[in-house]
Amino acid sequence: MTELVHELLERSARRAPQAEALRLGTRRQTYRELWDAAQGFARGVLALGAQRLDRIGIYLPKRFETVAAMFGSTIAGCVYVPINPLLKAPQVRHILRDCGIRILVTGVERARDLFADDESDPDALRWVVCVDGQLSLPATHTAQVAGWDSLPGELRGPHRVIDADMAAILYTSGSTGKPKGVVLSHRNIVTGAASVSQYLENTADDRLLAVLPLSFDYGMSQLTTAFRVGASVTLMDYLLPRDILTIAVRDGITGLAGVPPLWAQLVDLDWPDEIAAHLRYITNSGGAMPTATLRKLRARLPRTQVFLMYGLTEAFRSTFLPPSELDRRPDSIGKAIPNADILVINAAGKPCAPREPGELVHRGSLVALGYWNDVEKTAERFRSAPSKPDGIVTEELAVWSGDTVMMDEEGFLYFIGRRDEMIKTSGYRVSPTELEEVIYATGLVSDAVAIGVPHSALGQAIVIVASPARDGHGDEDNTTAKLLDRCRSALPAFMVPACIEWRDSLPRNANGKFDRKLLSTEFANLFATAGGS
């Protein structure tokens, strides 16, 4: 039985040491080679003085060393903190200081940018391990430097940990305030790998394409689910959406995970016939996939199973919709994944009746350990489960998601919106997701985000920020008029947008999701006139 994160890798290395674990460009790495590299990193950081549960930051693009450092950290009895390589120096320094990174694994150029002369070292940082060359830090810095290939390798036993101990800290995208570190235990990560690989029916024959950041729980899951069954993972930091299709053909990809903005980019490309021949499934999480996008994807990939999923970093993954249900309920996020219990709770703290909107609450072994060093925010999100059997005197913590959903009579769930993103206009609460569905269905946009903007008369006015359809014709004013006309015919008056703003592209956060917070800030004063209109 696998209990610790690195045992996912170890067991596959023992079962099939020569099987391919990773691909990167034309390079290949077997399970034995990856396991040896992870063990070597563990020995190295222990020789550098790493203590039990020390945090090890990994600030790299997708490389073999990135994966070895993640799993090597847990071998040593430490905690890995993957840092999105798209983040800039100020954001990275916040993470280094916030969770007390003791050892940082990075590249030379990234380290030079991080440790500029006028920036002091984070208090806890002791070592910088460079994977791609020699580095000399300015004399004002106290951290020491080691090379990946020259890490000491003295034999020393790893620190003892159990499945309840923390294994990783994943920093959320920070849609409100600075990013928060979600603390995941070995049990969280291993349970998630078992659950997801079960309903996706992963086997050693699968080849997964890791497009999403490994600092994103959904991206990290591509590694853990694959390693649990001995599958192969192609590592990719793409520049253009078409690159994804090129790699999918080259490597015979059988499983591809994406977020809605990525699917919106991919769906209008010309998909080579070879992809449909071997792409067994695709998955969506990180937001609702617009029905129009789903319809196009299914038309392009008639033999590919589509799994619509819902998850949050604080509980990894919560629900999935079996592909067999897509025709009947394409707008559903499904039911609870294996080994999770999903409840819909109303404002009185009671289970909702069928089709009554309420808050999604997740209980079970996927519930994270809380936010790193943040008592207040942890208390807001991690609270007592709504009910427990008589006789149990201890409290069970559940994740109260802040997301509004409803459950139908058959137990299938439907996403309505995030509580902190709901638009409050003319006395009504409006779901951005519902609005965006209508906008996408017109075929006039390629991307769209609905936001609420302060308005003196309405409370909030609805603004749509959109990119025109890639095959669109006509001028901007004409397209706006058409879009508003479609909205008026499909929506009640209070849901019709007050304004449509066109952009060539919409901003995305480090995990590839649309940056709603940035757009809300940008348009906050749009109606700041004397009359509020």
Image: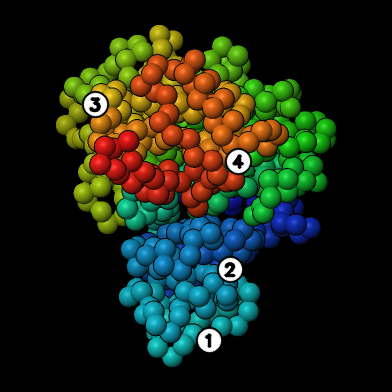
Task: Report the front residue among 416 and 39.
Answer: 416
* Element type at mark 1: loop
Q: Amino acid at mark 1?
A: Ser
Query: Which residue matches tag 3?
Result: 386
Q: Residues within 10 Å of mark 2 (few under 14, many from 20)?
A: many
Q: Judge depth for marks 4 and 3 and give the one in front.
A: 4
Q: Residue at x 39, y 27 (%)?
A: 431
Q: Amino acid at mark 2?
A: Gly
Q: Residues within 10 Å of mark 1 (few under 14, many from 20)?
A: few
Reading the chain from its start, which is encountered first: label 2 or label 3?
Answer: 2
Please say which color scheme the image uses: rainbow
On residue 40, the disc is: 2
Q: Is residue 248 left or right of residue 453?
A: right
Task: Report the front residue among 413 and 404.
Answer: 404
Q: Amino acid at mark 3?
A: Pro
Query: Which residue matches tag 1?
Result: 136
Reading the chain from its start, which is encountered first: label 4 or label 3?
Answer: 4
Marks 1 and 2 close (CB-CB < 8 Å) = no
Whether 129 is drawn above or below 333: the answer is: below
On residue 262, the disc is: 4
On residue 10, the disc is: none
Q: Judge depth for marks 1 and 2 and give the one in front.
A: 1
Alpha carbon separation for disc pair 2 and 3: 45 Å
Residue 53: give x, y in percent of width and height: 37, 62
Q: Residue at x 80, y 46 (%)?
A: 250
* Element type at mark 3: loop
Task: Report the front residue among 441 and 16.
Answer: 441
Alpha carbon separation for disc pair 4 and 3: 36 Å
Reading the chain from its start, which is encountered first: label 1 or label 4?
Answer: 1
Q: Residues within 10 Å of mark 4 (few under 14, many from 20)?
A: some
Q: Judge depth for marks 1 and 3 and give the one in front.
A: 1
